[in-house]
Amino acid sequence: MELVQRDQLQSLIDSFAGKDVYIHLETTNGSYAAHFQEGFFNAGAFIRNIVVNYELGKVAGDSPHRIGLKLPSGWIYAQGITHYELDEHGRLLMAGLGPDGKLAVSLEISETPFTY
Amino acid sequence: MMEKERHVLVIFPHPDDEAFGVSGTIATYIEMGVPVTYACLTLGEMGRNLGNPPFANRETLPAIRKKELQASADAMGLTDLRMMGLRDKTVEFEDDEKMVKLVADLIDELNPSLVISFYPGLSVHPDHDATGRAVVEAIRRMAESERPKLYTIAFDNKTVEQIGHPDVHHDVSGVTEKKLGAMNAHASQTVWMMEDMQKRLDAQDPDALKWLKTEHFYTYSFK
């Protein structure tokens, strides 16, 4: 993955619009957050291989970026995206990596299902 | 002095769970000629360490961690490594009976005299606790005379307050190179920690040496 180049990421997001695509979306503080910092309120969410068809996708903000996908009757968004790549399977992988190299958020779009 | 066992079954959910506090024990049993099986439930697919700049992404991490797990097994001399195909961070959401059966099937097949896993409720990560629960329940259902011993790892901040100090202590000073080999095999997870650890070991830091040369377990009581 490389640092987000906004125009390139925008055209990649455009290229999946109007197609049935599989989504991976994840936010996390890690399972040890409350262990290392007592009282830490640990929250996160994870969804994988849900099929959607978005009509409009946008990259917003300066780095870290926000990504929003408008669905026929709903929304998907992720904030904190710093890195991206189009992998060898044609999947658009986006992630928000902290300065410590730890993933905090991930949004991925693919025309084929992700593994389990 | 570690007791000779008929067969040791180690069950943890993540590649690297075996490395920190059990790799010396595993390597020592293997040197003693005791067969050891390590069943690793997931490939740590949801690991957060990807680096910045990243060395991996969410989709390539499992293959990296699978290789690291195999390398760790090689470092310990372990030949019976089972990868059980679950997904990281979902173990507690699997069907409880399915999890108990997964453990019971391994026990039926291998007839271990000792099982090593996590202490349910005191192992911090939900996957650790769920693994420990399934192991405890599978053994609890066995006739008392048939049950293997169960050694557990517990490291929640409340551990000492709730269950005191470990009662089993293994001298693994004969296999420190293998233990470090297992730790270093999981480079994607341990490289930062091991840089620091190596410095402390080089400086003869007493806590670091204690970590390297001894391993501690709580015998699980089914009473």
Image (cartoon, grey):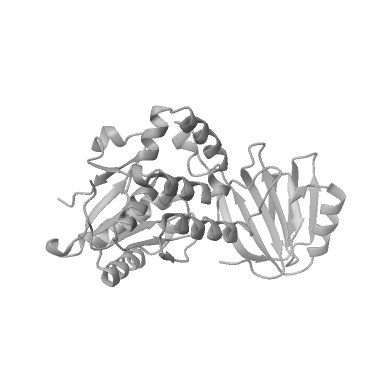
Q: In the figure, A68 relative to A115: above or below?
A: above
What is the tally of numbered marks visible in this picture?
Answer: 0
Look at the image and tell me whether residue A73 can be seen.
no
Q: Residue at x 74, y 45 (%)?
A: A66
Q: Residue at x 55, y 36 (%)?
A: B195
Q: In the figure, A86 relative to B203: above or below?
A: below
Q: Nearer the viewer, residue B15 or B81?
A: B81
Residue B166 position by quadrant: top left
Look at the image and tell me whether residue A14 can be seen.
yes
Q: Residue at x 61, y 65 (%)?
A: A49
Q: In the figure, A79 relative to B46: above or below?
A: above
Residue, far left: B145
Residue A91 position by quadrant: bottom right
Q: Could you say where residue B65 lies in the image, as x and y percent from the top left? A: 55, 56
Q: Could you say where residue B91 lies in the image, as x and y percent from the top left? A: 43, 58
Q: Could you say where residue A42 lies in the image, as x and y percent from the top left? A: 50, 40
Q: Nearer the viewer, residue A96 or B10?
A: B10
Q: Could you say where residue B15 lies in the image, as x and y percent from the top left? A: 48, 54
Left or right of B197? Residue A93 is right
Left or right of A82? Residue B113 is left
